[in-house]
């Protein structure tokens, strides 16, 4: 996968979470990890192709999919007020690329929802403005699923920025950290955004030395260590973040991503079950649990976890349907898998996996493995 030279491989948002793609890009720099990384980064399309070969539905010499840039994705978010009061009527959401270049903008209704579709870039910035409120800016890394579903809180003019107490992105240790520790964390955070992982590590280590139980700093240190291929200390730092604040959602998600990338599926499951004990309604945790169960070959559990994630968040991203279809195909639940493929094409007809999905659907139809009306081509986006 190619990126613009000098650009960070990852954007950190609220919550700041590393992407599986960014981590694997760093792993690819180390030859001894190339195989593991490519197994992790292999697209869901690659999984489809493998399954199709096993079913003798497609030619066995089809090359596996490699690392791909994001294509045809969407950002679906919601604007909220920190105290739960009604939203103003004049909210605008700007979508910008690098250097503030405007892509498009929307006016937000009283439900606070907004959506930008058919996006082909890797990094975007949302700028939300409303009369009587501070302008809020938030970066979106299109490689990371959760980043594409932002919640943006409006802050009245004259008030300091704060995260609502009920938000899982806040850590209790944020308020206990000393001024010096917070300053070191901010410098480390800025270095992470710039892809300066060594500098980030140094600053974040100073932050946790000053404040030994600073959960957010430990979590960010875990990311910095991961990007330097130091997985054992990265795991330890993320586990320390959880030990310092068991109610800090970000640490659970980051640790799950890291463990899944390392193919430590049993450990991922244990950490996620602990996270779900604190956050039983967080669909991202069930999503990572589905990935872990799929990696461990526990297809029934993977299906259950994916469906649970979808029940919590019905507006799942389009590629979610591809992942679920993969699990269903491996269980020979062809009709259900076919339905998920159709759902994917309805949600993202021009998406990254659209061509392979259409091909596999036609093969399933012609083989007699599915019943019902023949597959209809999804309309091209206008």
Image (tube, grey):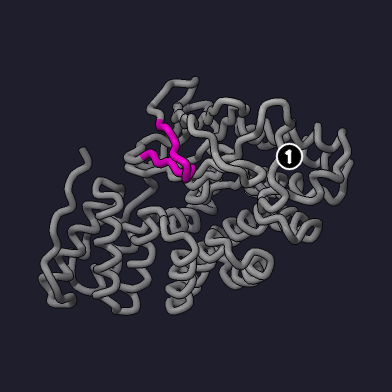
Residue at 49%, 54% in the rendered image: 37
| Residue closest to the eye, 68 or 137 | 137
| Residue closest to the eye, 38 or 338 | 338
Which residue is label 1 attached to? 201
Q: Is residue 106 above or below residue 58?
A: above
Q: Is residue 226 left or right of residue 335?
A: right
Residue at 61%, 67% in the rendered image: 280
Q: Secondary structure at mark 1?
A: helix
In which image quadrant can residue 52 be found?
bottom left
Tell me if I can see residue 370 in this picture: yes
Tell me if I can see residue 125 in this picture: no
Residue at 75%, 61% in the rendered image: 246
Q: Is residue 290 magenta?
A: no
In which image quadrant can residue 274 be found?
bottom right
Q: Is residue 267 above or below residue 258?
A: below
Q: Residue 13 location, x and y as percent?
A: 59, 40
Q: Quadrant of the C terminus?
A: top left
Residue at 88%, 39% in the rendered image: 178
Task: Identify the magenta region.
Answer: 106-116
């Amino acid at each position: 996968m190619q990126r613009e030279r000098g650009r960070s491989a990852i954007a950190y948002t609220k919550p700041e979470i590393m992407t599986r793609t960014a981590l694997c890009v760093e792993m690819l720099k180390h030859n001894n990890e190339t195989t593991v990384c490519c197994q992790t980064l292999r697209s869901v399309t690659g999984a489809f192709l493998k399954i199709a070969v096993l079913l003798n539905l497609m030619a066995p010499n089809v090359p596996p999919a490699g690392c791909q840039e994001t294509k045809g994705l969407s950002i679906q978010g919601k604007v909220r007020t920190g105290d739960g009061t009604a939203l103003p009527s004049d909210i605008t959401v700007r979508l910008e690329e690098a250097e503030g270049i405007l892509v498009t903008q929307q006016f937000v209704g009283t439900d606070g929802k907004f959506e930008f579709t058919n996006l082909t870039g890797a990094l975007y910035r949302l700028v939300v403005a409303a009369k009587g409120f501070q302008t809020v800016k938030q970066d979106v890394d299109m490689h990371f699923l959760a980043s594409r579903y932002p919640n943006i809180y409006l802050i009245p003019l004259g008030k300091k920025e704060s995260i609502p107490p009920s938000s899982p992105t806040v850590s209790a240790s944020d308020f206990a950290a000393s001024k010096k520790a917070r300053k070191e964390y901010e410098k480390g955070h800025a270095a992470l955004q710039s892809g300066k992982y060594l500098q980030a590590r140094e600053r974040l280590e100073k932050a946790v030395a000053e404040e030994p139980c600073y959960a957010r700093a430990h979590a960010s240190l875990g990311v910095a260590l991961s990007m330097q291929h130091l997985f054992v200390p990265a795991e330890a730092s993320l586990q320390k973040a959880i030990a310092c604040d068991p109610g800090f959602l970000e640490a659970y998600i980051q640790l799950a991503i890291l463990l899944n990338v390392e193919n430590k599926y049993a450990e991922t499951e244990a950490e996620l079950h602990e996270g779900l004990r604190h956050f039983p309604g967080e669909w991202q945790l069930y999503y990572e649990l589905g990935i872990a169960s799929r990696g461990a070959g526990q297809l029934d559990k993977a299906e259950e976890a994916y469906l649970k994630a979808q029940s919590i968040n019905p507006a799942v991203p389009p590629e979610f349907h591809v992942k679920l279809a993969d699990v269903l195909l491996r269980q020979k639940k062809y009709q259900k898998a076919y339905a998920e493929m159709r759902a994917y094409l309805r949600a993202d007809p021009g998406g990254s996996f659209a061509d392979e999905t259409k091909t596999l659907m036609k093969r399933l139809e012609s083989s007699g493995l599915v019943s019902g009306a023949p597959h209809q081509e999804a309309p091209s986006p206008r």
